Image: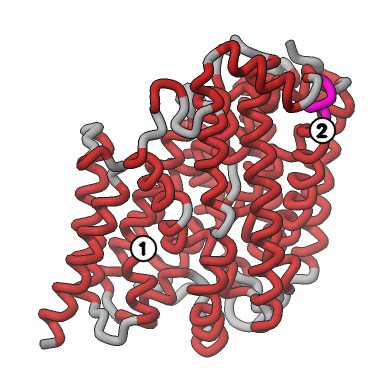
Amino acid sequence: MGDLSLLIPILLYLVVTLVIARVAAARQTGEGGFTQRYFLGGQFMGGTLLALALVTTYTSASSFIGGPGAAYKFGLGWVLLAMVQVPVAMLTLGVLGPKLWRLAKESGAVTILDVLEQRYRNGPLLVLAGVSLLAAFVGMVVVQFTGGARLLSVMTGVDYTVALAIFVGTVLLYTLWGGFRAVSYTDALQGLVMIFGMIALFIGLLVKGGGMTALTTELAAQDPGLLRPHGPDDFLSWPFLMSFWVLVCLGTLGLPHTVLRTMAVKDMSALRRAMVLGTAVSAVVILLPHLSGVLGRAMLPELASPDEVMPTLMVTLFPPMLAGLLLAAPMAAVMSSVDSMLLQAGSTLVRDLVQRQRPLSESAQKALSYGSTIGLTLLCGVLALDPPDMIVWLNLASLGALQVVFLWPLVLGLFWPRATATGAIASMLSGLALFLYWTFAAIKPLGLHAIVPSLAISGVVFVLFSLRRTN
């Protein structure tokens, strides 16, 4: 099915991201040591840059590959479900943004663990948070690598392993070259590519498929449940819907690689502009891929894996060169998430788990930062050699683990004066233990996803232990 001529525009796009990374790296300045410049780059982001970088960091292989794959399988109900993610930029920037920005400006905080250290002053809490972050990010980066390699493999016909090597190598290079500032600029470019690519794909799908009426008529003929809000066999039950609302909307306040962006904005007016623009961008890059996924089933009813719907649509609808350009849209979504995760994981290892124990020279900071980024990238690349069939589930499990660890310590720590380190640790341990047990045992309390009761119980635990300590 593949066509090697697709590689030409893809490789050109990858080269452009590398050039931007180099230019941004040359402009990178700032006070403090290497890690402070490399992992945050100062408060330099305007409203447009922040909005694009935030949305592209949050949207990922799950949004452009796994999400449309789920919509392909479960119908229009999944599209409605996915739209609950649209307010993520408004929530993140509006709720946490002002406080995190001021804290970063006043204290020089570079990572989310810096924020927790400023608030709680507790070593074991930071170690628990750091180890949890690293473990969850490994799972999430594996998902991104799998999505990127699968896209290249399906569309170009190259072996999956070769596609994985191309993708991993490119992301590693521009992450190493530029640090946070370079990643932010390449993410902005990728945000623009995502918007225009998805608009072009959706228009092409409507034209080729004979319009919305013809496509939905074909879907109804395949399975009327594809057009119902609750999907075939009522799979999208109310408990499932409530769970998803928590997991991909409210719970995103606990995602370190997303909320970190708010610490790099240059002023409050830029933060407010980013809230509005980010919400508009989210609506486009969430609605169109998911809607294309379900409508694509009308044209491609028998794919081997639902996750193949987006790349297969591009190959089917467009000539090779144009399809290669469109491939840059989901590729951008994957790359813009994985680079932020790699930087956050690297900063956790170097700045949070090593430098807090002993000071490092400038050269040692640089060597350890680069070494940890390379090591984590290679580890995730090896794990991605044997990918799961539907990456959306692995991604959601990793998201949930991050949320139960970070959401309450961040939110209550920033807004509740009586929050204590004891409450935070008890909340993190109880939430993570419950979430992992219910997830891997496939237990759904009251029919809910594990994230809902885990967050509810860990929140209560946080409050009780904090009040007990302060009384």
Q: Residues within 10 Å of mark 1 (few under 14, many from 20)?
A: many
Kind of residue at badge 1: Phe
Question: In the rendered view, would you say 196 is above or below 317?
Answer: below
Which mark sits nearer the N-terminus, 1 or 2?
Answer: 2
Q: Nearer the viewer, residue 96 or 4?
A: 96
- Identify the residue position indicated by label 2 in the image: 203
Q: Is residue 206 magenta?
A: yes
Q: Residues within 10 Å of mark 2 (few under 14, many from 20)?
A: some
Q: Can you tell which quarter of the image residue 352 is in?
A: bottom left
Q: Secondary structure at mark 2?
A: helix
Q: In this rendering, would 163 be left or right of 202?
A: left
Quarter holding the C terminus is: bottom left
Q: Nearer the viewer, residue 48 or 127?
A: 48
- Residue at x-position 67% and y-position 27%: 310
Question: In the rendered view, would you say 176 is above or below 274?
Answer: above
- Residue at x-position 24% and y-position 76%: 421
Instruction: Find residue 103 and report its horizontal and vertical position in percent.
Output: 50, 84
- Residue at x-position 23% and y-position 61%: 458
Which labelled disc corresponds to residue 406?
A: 1
Mark 1 vs mark 2: in front: 2
Q: In this rendering, would 142 be left or right of 436?
A: right
Q: Can you tell which quarter of the image residue 239 is in?
A: top left
Instruction: Find residue 443 and report its horizontal and vertical position in percent.
Output: 22, 35
Magenta residues? 203-208
Residue 82 visible in image: yes
Q: Is residue 162 magenta?
A: no
Marks 2 and 1: in contact by CB < 8 Å?
A: no
